């Protein structure tokens, strides 16, 4: 190249030459001359094998040497016939490769005509097997899309037309094409018409959705990002654009680097999805949507996503629905929310609710995560209309978890309960502004899956609305006992219900005791002896005893029957009794029945005390009929015998209980007398009081006196003397029996003298 030629080069040409210096390895600063011999070797007049050999040898030369001006035009004219459809494929490929080397090596010397000619090669020589080489030629001709000089009007429509062909089947080739397209948009967006941009959005979105190649999907996202950042996204393309982003956000990324970025940026408001279930979000996708929402079209994009969520035509497009929910969440109340988006949660939550109608766990999970984030960040700022929609959504999700058997539903349920717990925390701190009753209705619906603390709060809330001043309060109490005592299995919760029931009865005993026992206590506790939880049996026994102590109606007998079932359960159960802890409930019931007997003998009706006495006697009889059951545990026998041995009778055969503190009987029952001869009956009518003056009060008073037989009790004591193997119990009998036998009225209360039986039993021990 002469110095004159160098001086004539424009500044633009000099700069281009400077920045392209590395494209070839210059062996000489002199231009290479296209000789006649070279032209002859590659001309159509030479045999094909000579031509192809010469062309192959020229590839390196045209790539690395600067040739004289117009050499490119002459070389092109000599080899272009080898691109015909009738030319063998290997010859066409060799020629295309030669042209690529020629363009790359002589780039700065290509005239506008030659650039167009080479572009037309790419465009018009449409043999399917030549696509990859044509793409390489186009990449070289345009510096991978950065330079479309003299091709401005042709490039956009051609890329739109060629895109389906060049991206079909070959993922690597598709990714390379998209890379070129991105550069064309970035560096030459002013030359691409709006209709072409709209068409590209359609094609890119279609490819993004249906491609399984991550490089292609990433390329599509980059292309969409370039369109949004460097071009003018048309409103008619916005929906397609958003659909592509919403769908592609579900595609798994294989690049570990991108995943690390996503973990830092995205997962702060999405949580970590199970990889097998939902995949990992693509960073580029999130970035693009964030950029879109931050533009003047942000509100329009938000509206479009809400409309997509409500469109019944997209109800089965799970990827679209999930992506739209995620982006709305991200834009409005995510960690990196878009401040420009002025939209209340109440405006978008109805769309979330509509999206749930697809009944797919992926969408359910995404909505649950979004609600969870909203409640966590802005729960104390939400008011009733918003809370109403949130509770609608939670109710729908609960319904889904109740019916779905899909594995992913477990993730939905876990997130759901975290959200409910967060709302509970707001309620505890008085920051919840929604309907409390409806919220607890939802907790009740999923109470089986809620923690114990949550259910206890629910029970406390329900208990606060149970009382005579509330509508159908007894039915509410029955429902509470049904759900959280009868059906529930967790001990703490069942105990809480028993505590609530106890409190309700104590508060309303004066007026509603009989109704509560008839409608609640007896129906739900009549089979408590069959309950596998000993703690519940024990607490229930305490409740029944407390009720019996205050109950003066016939319902007391029904309660005593239940207590009798509890204390006799070990005789029909296969569970071994080896320590006191095994019969904790039995001991509680026995102590309670003893207390009922000793307190009820001083009150009417006397039948309650007699019933309690008979239950204790029958229980002792069972001990000696089947001694193996309580062989290792004698506590209940000891307690019953201890109470029986404190019974005393006065001269009028009224019975009383020995006071353990002073060893005397301070009070005898005015209503219970021992059975004795008829000649003594008249003297027993008045108890400890003097006979009344008139016969009418005498007749009225005598009707309250009830005779009671201790014969069975005496027989049990005799059985103990004969059969008892536990020294503690036997020692009690032998120690206290002499004191009892000194009570003449007690021992000689009937015609048949029981002292002979005692004497015989004691003699048998000595003999």
Image (cartoon, rainbow, N blue to C red):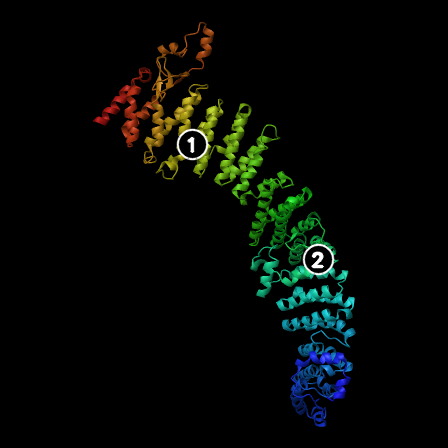
Q: Quadrant of residue 665?
A: top left
In the image, residue 634 above or below residue 329: above
In the image, residue 740 above or below residue 223: above
- Left or right, 537 with respect to 577, comes to right
Could you say where residue 11 lies in the image, as x and y percent from the top left?
Answer: 76, 79
In the image, residue 309 above or below residue 465: below
Could you say where residue 456 lies in the image, as x and y percent from the top left?
Answer: 53, 39
Q: Does residue 450 appear in this view? A: yes
Q: Nearer the viewer, residue 17 or 488?
A: 17
* Front label number (2 vs 1): 2
Quadrant (top left, top right, bottom left, bottom right) of the N terminus: bottom right
Q: Residue furthest top?
A: 693
Residue 754: numbered disc: none
Label 1 packing within 10 angstroms: few (<14), some (14-19), many (20+): some
Q: Which residue is tagged 1? A: 565
Mark 1, secondary structure of its residue: helix
- Left or right, 535 with respect to 149, comes to left
Q: Which residue is tagged 2? A: 293
Could you say where residue 614 lies in the image, as x and y percent from the top left?
Answer: 39, 25
In the image, residue 13 above or below residue 625: below
Q: Quadrant of residue 363?
A: bottom right
Label 2 packing within 10 angstroms: few (<14), some (14-19), many (20+): many
Q: Nearer the viewer, residue 408 or 568?
A: 408
Residue at the image position 48 percent from the left and 39 percent from the top? 491
3D distance between C-alphas at marks 2 and 1: 71 Å
Could you say where residue 721 lies in the image, as x and y percent from the top left?
Answer: 28, 27
Quadrant (top left, top right, bottom left, bottom right) of the C terminus: top left
Q: Residue furthest bottom?
A: 37
């Amino acid at each position: 190249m002469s110095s004159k030629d160098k001086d004539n080069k424009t500044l633009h040409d000099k700069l281009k030459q400077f920045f392209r210096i590395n494209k070839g390895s210059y062996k000489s600063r002199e231009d290479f001359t296209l000789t006649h011999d070279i032209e002859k070797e590659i001309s159509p007049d030479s045999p094909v094998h000579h031509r192809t050999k010469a062309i192959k040898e020229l590839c390196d030369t045209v790539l690395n040497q600067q040739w004289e001006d117009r050499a490119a035009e002459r070389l092109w004219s000599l080899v272009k016939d080898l691109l015909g459809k009738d030319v063998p494929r290997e010859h066409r490929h060799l020629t295309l490769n030669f042209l690529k080397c020629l363009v790359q090596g002589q780039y700065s010397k290509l005239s506008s005509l030659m650039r167009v000619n080479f572009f037309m090669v790419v465009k018009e020589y449409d043999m399917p097997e030549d696509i990859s080489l044509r793409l390489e030629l186009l990449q070289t001709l345009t510096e991978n899309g950065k330079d479309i000089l003299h091709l401005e009007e042709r490039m956009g429509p051609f890329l739109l037309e060629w895109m389906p062909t060049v991206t079909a089947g070959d993922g690597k080739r598709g990714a390379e094409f998209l890379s070129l397209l991105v550069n064309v948009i970035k560096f030459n967006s002013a030359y691409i018409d709006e209709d072409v941009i709209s068409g590209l959005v359609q094609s890119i979105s279609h490819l993004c959705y249906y491609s399984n190649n991550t490089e292609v999907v990433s390329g599509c996202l980059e292309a969409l990002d370039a369109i949004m950042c460097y071009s003018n996204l048309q409103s008619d393309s916005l929906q397609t654009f958003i659909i592509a982003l919403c769908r592609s956000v579900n595609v798994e990324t294989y690049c570990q680097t991108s995943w690390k970025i996503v973990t830092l940026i995205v997962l702060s408001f999405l949580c970590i999805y199970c990889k097998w279930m939902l995949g990992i979000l693509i960073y580029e996708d999130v970035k693009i949507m964030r950029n879109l929402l931050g533009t003047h079209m942000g509100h329009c994009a938000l509206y479009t996503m809400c409309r997509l969520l409500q469109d019944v035509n997209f109800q089965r497009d799970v990827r679209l629905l999930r992506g739209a929910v995620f982006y709305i969440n991200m834009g409005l109340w995510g960690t990196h929310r878009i401040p420009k988006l002025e939209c209340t949660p109440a405006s978008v939550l109805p769309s979330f609710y509509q999206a749930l109608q697809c009944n797919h766990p992926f969408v359910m999970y995404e909505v649950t995560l979004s609600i969870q984030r909203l409640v966590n960040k802005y729960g104390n700022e939400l008011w009733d209309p918003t809370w109403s929609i949130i509770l609608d959504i939670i109710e729908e999700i609960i319904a889904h978890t109740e019916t779905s058997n899909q594995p992913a539903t477990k993730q939905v349920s876990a997130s759901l309960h975290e959200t409910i717990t967060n709302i509970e925390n707001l309620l505890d701190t008085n920051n919840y502004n929604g309907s409390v009753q409806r919220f607890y209705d939802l907790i009740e619906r999923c109470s089986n899956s809620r923690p114990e603390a949550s259910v206890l709060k629910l029970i406390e809330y329900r208990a606060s609305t149970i009382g005579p001043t509330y509508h159908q309060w007894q039915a509410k109490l029955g429902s509470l006992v049904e759900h959280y005592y009868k059906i529930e299995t967790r001990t703490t919760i069942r105990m809480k219900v028993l505590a609530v029931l106890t409190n309700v009865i104590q508060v309303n005993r004066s007026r509603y005791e009989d109704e509560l026992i008839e409608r609640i206590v007896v129906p739900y506790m009549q089979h408590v002896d069959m309950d596998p939880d000993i703690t519940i049996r024990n607490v229930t026994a305490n409740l029944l005893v407390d009720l019996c102590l205050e109950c003066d109606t016939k319902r007391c007998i029904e309660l005593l029957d239940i207590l009798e079932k509890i204390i006799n359960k070990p005789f029909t159960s296969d569970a071994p009794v080896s320590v006191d802890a095994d019969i904790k409930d039995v001991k509680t019931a026995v102590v309670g029945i003893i207390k009922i007997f000793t307190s009820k003998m001083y009150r009417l009706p006397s039948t309650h005390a007699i019933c309690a006495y008979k239950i204790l006697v029958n229980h002792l009889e069972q001990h000696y009929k089947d001694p193996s059951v309580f062989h290792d545990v004698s506590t209940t026998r000891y307690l019953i015998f201890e109470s029986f041995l404190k019974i005393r009778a006065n001269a009028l055969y009224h019975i009383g209980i020995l006071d353990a503190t002073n060893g005397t009987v301070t009070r005898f029952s005015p209503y219970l007398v021992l059975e004795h001869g008829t000649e003594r009956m008249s003297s027993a009518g008045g108890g400890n009081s003097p006979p009344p003056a008139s016969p009418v009060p005498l007749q009225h008073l005598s009707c309250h006196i009830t005779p009671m037989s201790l014969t069975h009790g005496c027989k049990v004591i005799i059985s103990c003397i004969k059969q008892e193997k536990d020294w503690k119990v036997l020692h009690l009998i032998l120690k206290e029996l002499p004191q009892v036998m000194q009570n003449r009225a007690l021992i000689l209360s009937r015609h048949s003298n029981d002292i002979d039986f005692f004497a015989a039993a004691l003699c048998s021990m000595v003999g």
